[in-house]
Amino acid sequence: MEKVEADSTKLVKIENFEGPFDLLLFLVKNSKINIEDIVISDITSQFLSKLKYENPLDIELYSNFVLTISMLLYIKSRSLLPIDIHLDEEIDERTRIAEGLIEYRVYKKAAEVLKNQFENEKVLIRKDIQLRLDFKDDENWEEMSIVELIMAFSKIAKEVDTSIFKVLEIEKISIDDKIDEITDYLLKNESIMFSSLFTDNITKYELIITFLAILELVKMEKIIILQHRLFGDIKIIRRRN
Amino acid sequence: MRLTLNDQIIESILFLENKPVGINKLKEISGLKKEEIIKSIDNINAILDMVGSPLTVIKNDKNDFHLTVRENLYEHLKDYYDSRKKIKLSQQAIETLAIIAYKQPITKIEIEAIRGVQVGHVIKQLLEYGLIKITGKRNSPGKPILYGTTDKFLKYFGLLSLKDLPPIEEFDRL
Amino acid sequence: MRLTLNDQIIESILFLENKPVGINKLKEISGLKKEEIIKSIDNINAILDMVGSPLTVIKNDKNDFHLTVRENLYEHLKDYYDSRKKIKLSQQAIETLAIIAYKQPITKIEIEAIRGVQVGHVIKQLLEYGLIKITGKRNSPGKPILYGTTDKFLKYFGLLSLKDLPPIEEFDRL
């Protein structure tokens, strides 16, 4: 892109001014050169001879040139018309183009400054935040109804059914034993995961005992069953009162 | 008591990464040895403590280090930063989100196969909330769109990274 | 010398925002008065200096504040964290960006009127780089799209806010 800039400033040389936009701007802004003194065909032939050696063709340069020439032609053609047939809107159009060019000049300078800033500023970019705060997970747990609990249990029961043949020993544990076991655990620990009560090698007997123990504890208002709102995990905590 | 250049570099990396950083990444960027990094982090934390900085370096269960705001400041900031309060998710949306979280990248059809209901409008809603995003297209007939969760999802649910999702096996038994 | 609770809250906000924060936003989030905030920031900087922290709060005269890494660490970290290096801005792109920066919100047609060439592909590129964004639609026939610069633009050009752009009048005289 630097190359294009350098080329385009050398594009046209008339008087002391170079570059299509700068030239045009100068004409419009300062009226130091009369538009009638410019032979547009000179400029075009200069450009065309340059194009011959230009390989491959620089489209950006070319389109800028065409635009500039057409503006020059436009202004020139307006200037050739008798003043009294100028319509207001045509003057407006001419002024608009002129203002656009003056403005462009300003922003071209601003762009230089910005470019400098971009190249020389020492900026380390901090990555965007993944987490703002580590939210306490507490708020994600909500109390579960007995119906939901039974549904969760029945899913486990179905799975255990298929593995029931593995274990043949006689169970001696009672519901009261299980209640004590859970209560004891919850006195020492904050919570217990529902799934951890039902280990892989649990027997159907123990499964039912465990579940009945949980139901009993809920009825006795000793525990609260919570389910994670997102992940559906179930945990049991001690009811404090 | 001042930070050394090593300490400064480590703290800068943690600041610029703005998320938990593993020891290997710290080694790679800083060019320091593991022991030097551990020493620096101890030093950083000691100094942050000393001046009562709101920041601290925590270590998560993957041994990643994270420069973050101390917990005691949450209560002063949560009104502004707890974006969860502004989002209401239906049960449908939560279930769909859970499936996407665990099985990403995943297509709409695949989600529907699991959930047994159409999820078009739920996906639209989750996209609008910025909890999921389009992550690409599956290279199969029809080039179906793939969905995944966003950083906002992690933030919203208080997860440090996707590795911190509870293992799906935990729920399989339920 | 320790940070007060006010200082901690202000530093937390600056840490969490990850971009320059204006005094009004700080007031809103912290509930503190302007003078208290200014005092806190002086305090934060004094303590960060004291312990040789790699972080510092930079400020402009419009009271925008940004918690950032000190310049002396740039050399050690630029390979990883000066992501601007991946961006190549053509002359066209930088000129278009300058016009958008100063005249935002602005439509494509308006930019083209100034530049005298079509800027469609340049706008697309700037959007892809995340330096500009669509800010809305002008309420005029055809409802043309309006463009403006992003926070990333400010970050990449080392500006605390748009108010820190060099005044456009400066270029007018040249």
Image: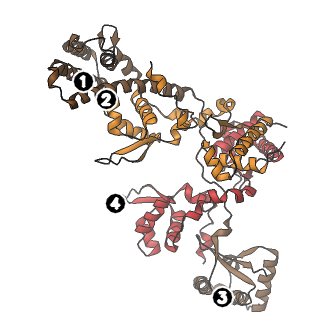
Chain colours: A brown, B red, C orange
Confirm whether circles 1 and 2 share one chain: no
Same-chain status of marks 4 and 3: no
For residue B33, say whether it is visible: no
The answer to which of A232 and A195 lies nearer the viewer is A232
In the image, A225 versus A89, the foreground residue is A89
Q: Which mark is residue C116?
A: 2
Chain of the residue displaying label 2: C
Residue C82 screen position, x and y as percent? 58, 35
Measured Cα–Cα span from mark 2 to mark 4: 46 Å
- Asked whether the residues under the numbered discs 1 and 2 touch, taking CB atoms below 8 Å apart as contact, a structural biologist would say yes
Gap in angstroms between the C-alphas marked 3 and 1:
91 Å
The verdict on a common chain for dots 3 and 2 is: no
Q: Position of residue C97 (x, y in %)?
A: 43, 34
From what the image shows, is residue B47 above or below residue A169?
Answer: above
Residue corresponding to mark 3: A204
Vertical placement of C34 versus B137: above or below? above
Mark 4 Cα-neighbour bin, 10 Å: few <14, some 14–19, many ≥20:
few
The subunit letter for the residue under badge 4 reads B
Residue annotated with mark 4: B141
Q: Which percent across, then down, holds residue B154?
A: 59, 58
Quarter of the rendering occupied by the N terminus of chain C: top right
Mark 3–mark 2 distance (CA, rounded to whole Å): 82 Å
Decide which of B115, A107 is in the foreground and name it: A107
Query: Could you tell me the amino acid type at mark 2?
Result: Gly
- Disc 3 secondary structure class: helix
Q: Residue at x 65, y 72 (%)?
A: A141
Residue wearing tag 1: A71
Residue A12 at least partly seen: yes
Is label 4 in a helix, a strand or a loop? Answer: loop
Check the image and name the residue furthest to the top. A15
Q: In the rendered view of the protein, which quadrant contains the C terminus of chain C?
A: top left
